[in-house]
Amino acid sequence: MHGTRQKRMLTMTQGSLVKNIFIFSLPLMLSNVLQVLFNMSDVAVVGKFGPEGSLGAVGSTTIYVALFTGLLIGLGTGINAVMAQRIGAADEEGQHRVCHTSFIISAVFGLIVSALAMGLARPVLTLMGTKPEFMEGALNYVYIYFTGAVGTAMYNFGNGVFSADGDTRKPLIFLSAAGVTNVLLNLFFVIVCNMAVVGVALASSISQWLSCVLILAALMRAKRAYRLRLGLLKFDRDIARRVLVLGIPAGIQNAIFQLANLFIQSGVNSFDGAVVEGNSAAVNADTIVFELMAAFYTACTSFIGQNYGAGKRDRILKSYFIAVGYACVFGLIFGLGIYAFADAFLYIFTDSAAVVAAGRDRLAVMCLSYAISAFMDGTIAAARGLNKTIVPTIMVILGSCVFRVFWVYVIFPIEGTTTLLYLLYPVSWAITAVCEIVYFIFAYRRSMRLLTPADGQGERA
């Protein structure tokens, strides 16, 4: 019935995995990088055109905002995994139930996150050591920014559904439109209206709701079994449990990385101002490279989820190796590329030679290490495609939070150098990756015993 459209859709259960995983990931990479650049526009515009103190107020909220937006992104990951399995199994009724139940969950979850983010803002920002002169501006930014939390939740819901079906183009277009709107509104509110912190926060909230409206409208027009019909909204407890069991741990995992960063920042703060600023400048490289690599993790979950739903054993393992391989190679290439032009990259954020030198010290460790993280994050994504997420999340908590706190307070003081501090990243990634891989082998073997042989096992990779 929809043959023409399906020919244009990327197929995850047939054809070349090497080709299809890359084609699937490319729009996601562009989408992720655009999102990073658009988010940076808040800081850039308010820092360039806002009054003194505006930059510090917005910058003080970065980790706090990431804590809660990570929860929303995680829920979208759970929706993606469950929907991919239903599409792979050709279960049209299941796709309908996943879409409509996930819509309800996302709306409620967005409201909860919004309330928590606003309610906890003052005590948490105080605990984070936000300077008194920045506090009111930071609170205003958080309060206004999170009026768009429901919009972000709904966008991630739609993104999870479309990506599970191999359509990463629509989410890219919608996010691009919202991002351009965000930048234009930033400039308008700050330069023309002199709204500074309030202006960039309002621009972010409006752009979040715009991406929500665009992706929901597309879901309502979709010629697929998961087409969204508001009049048919119905809550399915079993589907909700599956989505939350996968999505909540994924969200907690995202938040945990930010919590760990708080402890690492305490180590950075033990050095002089140039090191602190150099670290802040160099962190932008992490954000860009990690978001590029994250596209392959989404591909890993989606491809494994669909092929697991379709009972195609051979393609499950091949999807894992290919997606992790891509992430590793991209992490290495872009890491080395940034390091090769380290000074030029760092001078984008500062005019100080001392700050650039300090930032270069961080890049020397990080740019050579990004590839290691692929084995940790890619394996977690693969386990998620097999409905396994609790144990991998516990491993991440131990490896990326507990171990890092131990390193900051026990290992780092031995020499007290920036190099020793930054080495905690590749070491924690390597240790966690080994544990994740061992668990994935166990989970894969157990999951395969539950599958019956499917046709098409010999399809090319």
Image: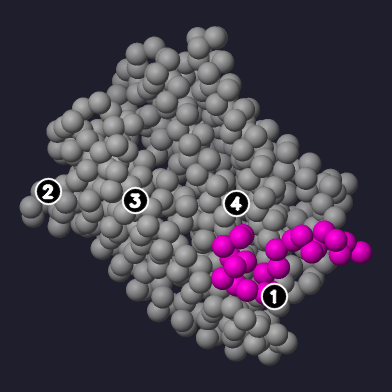
Q: Position of residue 107 (x, y in %)?
A: 68, 43
Q: Picture quarter containing residue 407? A: bottom left
Q: Nearer the viewer, mark 2 or mark 1?
A: 1
Mark 2 surroundings within 10 Å by alpha-carbon count, few (fewer than 14), some (14 through 19), many (20 or more): few
Q: Earlier in the sequence, mark 2 or mark 3?
A: 3
Q: Are marks 1 and 3 in contact (CB under 8 Å)?
A: no
Left or right: residue 344 compared with residue 103 = left
Which mark, by number, is residue 14? 1
Amino acid under label 4? Pro
> Which span of residues is magenta-colored?
1-24
Whole-Å distance between the Cαs marked 2 and 1?
A: 51 Å
Q: Picture quarter containing residue 144? A: top right
Label 4 sits on residue: 27
Disc 3 is placed on an element classified as helix
Disc 1 is placed on an element classified as loop
Q: Is residue 7 magenta?
A: yes
Q: Earlier in the sequence, mark 3 or mark 4?
A: 4
Q: Does 306 sit above or below residue 50?
A: below
Q: Nearer the viewer, mark 3 or mark 4?
A: 3
Q: Is residue 124 at least partly visible in the picture?
A: yes
Q: Does 73 sit above or below residue 142?
A: below
Q: Residue at x 18, y 38 (%)?
A: 357
Q: Are marks 3 and 4 in contact (CB under 8 Å)?
A: no
